[in-house]
Image (cartoon, grey):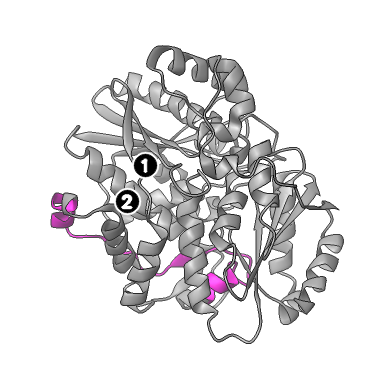
Amino acid sequence: MKFYSTNRKAPEVDLKNAVLNGLAPDNGLYMPEVINPFKKDFFEDIEQYDFPDLAAQISRQLLSTAIDLNKLDEIVKAAVNFPAPVIQVNDNIHTLELFHGPSLAFKDFGARFMARLMSYFVEGENRKLHILVATSGDTGGAVALGFHGMPNIHVTILYPQGKVSPLQEKQLTTLGGNITALEIDGTFDDCQAMVKQAFLDTDLRKELMISSANSINISRLIPQIFYYFEAYKQVKKSAEKLMMCVPSGNFGNITAGLFGLKMGLPFDQFVAAVNNNDGFHRYMETGHFEAKPSVQTLSTAMDVGNPSNLARINDIYKDDVALIRTDIHSASYDDPSTQRVIKEVYDQKGYILDPHGAVGYLASKAFAEKHPESLCIFQETAHPSKFKEIVEPLIGKAVEIPEQLRVLMDREKESIKMDADYAEFKTYLNSLKTL
């Protein structure tokens, strides 16, 4: 199986090279050459699989000729060892809880799979693999925990100073070992641009073996397909029409859902829910995308002004915005709306939303009002305790902090402060040659 670049100006590569390189030489994102759909009877009998077995079936379908299947099963089942339950919140609105992994965020699925796949691919290499990752919140924590202690791999996480929650920052900056956090005086887009520039720096890449753990890396998206199928398995008998709402920032998550559609997943509609960083929403309305600097909101992981994975979405739909609209509806909500709905849903239903899930709930509610025949599922992408400073004043009570976060609270933060300057970043990267 081969992977091609969305820019179509680089040679096709195998899975190992797509994963370890992260970004194609022409600055494009890798896409699978073929996505084979499941037969109809797979979905008819989907209940026979528990979540790890279902994930293994999906990965085999997508990567059947790309990797030893027994090793693939081993990687998948080690990565997917926690649940993704669908919970009813309000009438025909449900949530897919994706925060039951080690870092309490949906990105645990991608990070844990990716760490094990990369570790497999670098066995026997005579030099260290350096993972570079930009984060607007949850990616960094998931990657830090997923890769911590992995042999022959070092991780550098770039995050925007003052623009992630305190508990998210603890997850990035307290593990030590093979994890280094760079605190960038800038935005997530600055962090992402620095990482992308490193990948295009041919002199640097001659000296360092680097890869990415952001959703630009195809191995992040593959395991995110798993929970779309798991959600369908849980609700398939509840309604004839199904909608999945995805709180969206860099658009890797919803792109994974689109891969699921190409594999035959029977969802009728997706909704991309965004905050004030509404470039995709405007794109859907006007047919013209304009990248803008990101603005800070309460739903920090969605603060992306130029989402990388739009390149993959446009590739899937051949740059046809009208065709994209047939599968994806979009909606945008501001911080006051987010705050109101967190309080409203807790007061009325006793369910605690995090700010990202709150944006998803708002979009789902609007969709459900127009489509009462659909069962609507929005994704809760992070545990609300990671945003306790926002959530607790709104609901009037303390949010219980799970043990895996509580143990980090008293640890000392360790980070390297840096300007949003590639030359300074490159100096740091050159210092890694001695690791």
Residue 315 visible in image: no
Q: Quadrant of residue 286?
A: top right
Q: Return the disc, 2 or 1, that comes first in the chain's sequence.
A: 2
Residues 133 and 292: in front is 133
Mark linked to residue 327: 1
| 296 on left or right of 299 | right
Residue 57: x and y in percent read: 27, 63
Identity, as a three-letter code, of the amino acid under mark 1: Asp
**Secondary structure type for disc 2:** helix
| 308 on left or right of 85 | right
Q: Which residue is tagged 2? A: 261
Identity, as a three-letter code, of the amino acid under mark 2: Leu
Q: Residues within 10 Å of mark 1 (few under 14, many from 20)?
A: some
Identity of the residue drawn at 46% across and 72% down = 3
What's drawn in magenta, residue-wise?
17-46
Q: Residues within 10 Å of mark 2 (few under 14, many from 20)?
A: many
Q: Are marks 2 and 1 in contact (CB under 8 Å)?
A: yes
Mark linked to residue 344: none
Residue 156: x and y in percent read: 70, 61
**Secondary structure type for disc 1:** helix
Say whether residue 36 is magenta. Answer: yes
Identity of the residue drawn at 60% across and 28% down = 388
Spatial CA distance of label 2 from label 1 is 9 Å
Identity of the residue drawn at 77% across and 52% down = 414
Say whether residue 359 is magenta. Answer: no
| 135 on left or right of 84 | right
